[in-house]
Amino acid sequence: MSSIPTKQIDGDVAISRNVTTGGNAAVRGSATINHNLTVKGWLDAPNVKGPSKGLFITPESLREAYPTPQEGWWALVGDTLPAHVYMCIGGAWNGQYDADGSPRLAGTLTIDSAAYLETVEGFKGELEVIKTDVGQHHDAIEGLQTEQVAHERLIRLLQSAADAAQTTADAAKAVTDSKGQPDGIAPLGVDGKVPAAHLPGYVDDVVEFGAVVSGVTVELGVVSGCVSTDAWCMVVYDDEHHVFLLAESRRRPAADDGMEATAEGLSAAADAIMDDDYQSDLDSGTPADRFRYYSNWQDGDVFGRLSLAGRVPEAGKVYVSTREKRVYHWSGTRLELVGSGLVLGATPGTAFPGDEGASTTEKVDALRDEFDGHVSSSERRVEELQDIVDSYAMPVMIDLPDLSYRLGKIPLVSLNGIVDAVEELDGLESVHGTTNYYFVRQEKAIYWIDYGVAYGPVQSISTIGMAPIMITDALFICGNQVYSFDGERLNRVVTTADVDAMPAARESSMEVEDVYRPEMKVFDDEWRAAGGTVIVSGVTYGCNGTDDLTYEEAVEIKQLYSKRKTDDYSRMFFAATVRALLPVWLPNALVKLSSMFQSAAGLTKIVFRSNVSPCIVRIGDFTTTFHTCSNLKEIDGVLDVSNMTSPIYYPTFMLDGRLEDVWISGLKYSANFQDCKSLSLASLQYLVDNAANTTAITITVHHDVYAKLTDESNTEWNALLAQAAEKNITFATV
């Protein structure tokens, strides 16, 4: 027996919800189903009411399937469609035939449709009832739709009110959250005043330092154990690198210096030593060996941000030099005087006392009266000297052998004359059998004539006993003048000895570019070969966009390249004082650039070149390469960092914000450009497009650059954020 209890209910049962049976159900009476009937298993119902019984191959198979058909049933017999129609007539299956005796495959079936018509009429009545119900339901639905529209309008009004309330709450929260935060609202203390910690630096931040120095040697990477208030120390401002340093006296006072071994005595001794040493430095005009200079020390944070060269001053602060009694402020690149900065004194940079100035004026007036008496005689002497100058105004060749350079002698060619146009050569007489040369100004070329006919321009010449040479390698004698030809014009020639012997000529009406100096040719050729330009030989030179370099500056630049190595270019131009550099030629190999241009503050453009175009610099070491290049704006050449195994740290591009263009490819690790506030969109676009990272990296930029990247109205800059995100690159700022 089953343990599940069995209940028997006599009478009717009505169930308003679902019914689930776990076993079989047997219904001995009739069942009415008002809705759909779903049968997931097989339906075994041999007496299902339905006129069509399907398609059968033979009449026998039809009769076997339905041996007792009912009136109205029909079926199809055959193995194709259309098929022979069979109908139940008199309780038996009978095939239907047309009048000609052929099986009926189509047409009107001969059945009694009266029963069906009655059923149809019944359906029509039910349909009318359904129409009435549908109409009533339609009216109800329209009412519900109208009510729904009203509810939706109310919901929108409530949502708008909620959004406005949320906006107000967010704004209030933002104000509350900004309390005491950067760019927020300053809180009040218990005394009802703003605490000093929340006041701008310029309100109460005055920093005192000792003095201003330049040309000092700094202990880089060494942290002094002293503080700025120690008696034998003082903070100085390095006017060359624009940073604060700690100057520590090499002579510390002690008890055996003859002073009392007390705090007051040692302090007095220290002050005396510091004053003596500092004054000695001023008197000598050069830094003495009396101090050690440190770029970092214990309380260095008071004086600014730490850099490799020293402490960089901060904007918004007042800096007072205690020894010079002057007030400075930080301009962003250097300390600048507030006001005139003048103090009384008789040394450069001081103001002369008024009473002493009056006395000096009286003495000057007396000297002026005495001087006026000598003016007339001096003017006469000047006129005499001018006559001498005029006699040297046109340089002439004095000693032809002095013109020799290279190997052998320069061939001398006779120049018959100088004309303006080729037409002037027509009809000129010439000596038969000789070559008659003329310089034509309009053509900027040398022609020769024979029998009154002009030929040219001439590219080479032949002289007796010598092979043909280019005309630019010859000298031309015309009258008492000697000329060289540079391919476009004639240049008057004097020897080095002649130039040195004629200072009046060099300072008078003779143009500098008209003087040809053979000993400059070697330097000029090497300068051009290195990528420079010669503006005026021996006078003005150019390179990398700078075209006002003096000859002395060009020589200094060229000497820097003697440090060139095979693959290690570390510190090659470290602290160079030049304003420009020639293109730096690098091998197509991995190179080290550690501190290569560090502290070269005068450079505005750096150009890399190699035998590959565009130049690709394959970098192995990038440490502090451009550190404190404060005027650098452009780096020409692709910097390939794909071989680096560490990020590009902040000191590498720790500049003063002028850098605009730099092209970096193969970036695999994070990079820091937080000092580069002028960095161009093209540079960042190139960096992202050519990055080679396989993991997430971060590019830190200046907050001005970050503002442009995150400004949705600045579409070009803002689009770069999405492009970077696709490569797993994030931009950040500090």
Image (spheres, helix red, strand yellow):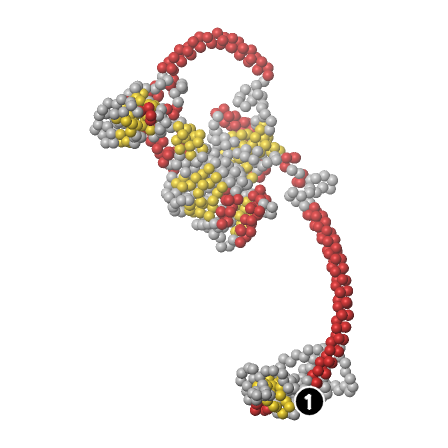
Q: Position of residue 519 (x, y in %)?
A: 33, 27
**Against 618, is 440 above or below?**
above
Nearest the eye: 255 or 145 = 145
**Residue located at (69% from left, 80% from top):** 20
Nearest the eye: 179 or 604 = 604
The image shows a total of numbered marks equal to 1
The 10 Å Cα crowd at callout 1, few under 14, some 14 to 19, many 20 or more, is few
**Residue located at (52% from left, 32% from top):** 238
Which residue extends farthest right?
11
Q: Is residue 135 left or right of residue 259?
A: right
The disc labelled 1 sits on which kind of residue? Met
**Residue located at (37% from left, 24% from top):** 514
Which residue extends farthest left?
465
Does residue 223 show up? Answer: no
Q: Position of residue 596 (x, y in %)?
A: 44, 40
Q: Secondary structure at mark 1?
A: loop
Q: Which residue is mark 1?
A: 1
Q: Is residue 147 left or right of residue 229?
A: right
Q: Quadrant of the N terminus?
A: bottom right
**Against 82, is 167 above or below?**
above
Q: Position of residue 419 (x, y in %)?
A: 34, 23
Nearest the eye: 211 or 626 = 626
Q: Position of residue 547 (x, y in %)?
A: 44, 31
Does residue 700 show up? Answer: yes
Nearest the eye: 116 or 416 = 116
**Residue located at (45% from left, 33% from top):** 546
Which residue extends farthest front?
100
Q: Is residue 128 left or right of residue 713?
A: right
Q: Quadrant of the C terminus?
A: top right
Q: Is residue 43 left or right of residue 363?
A: right
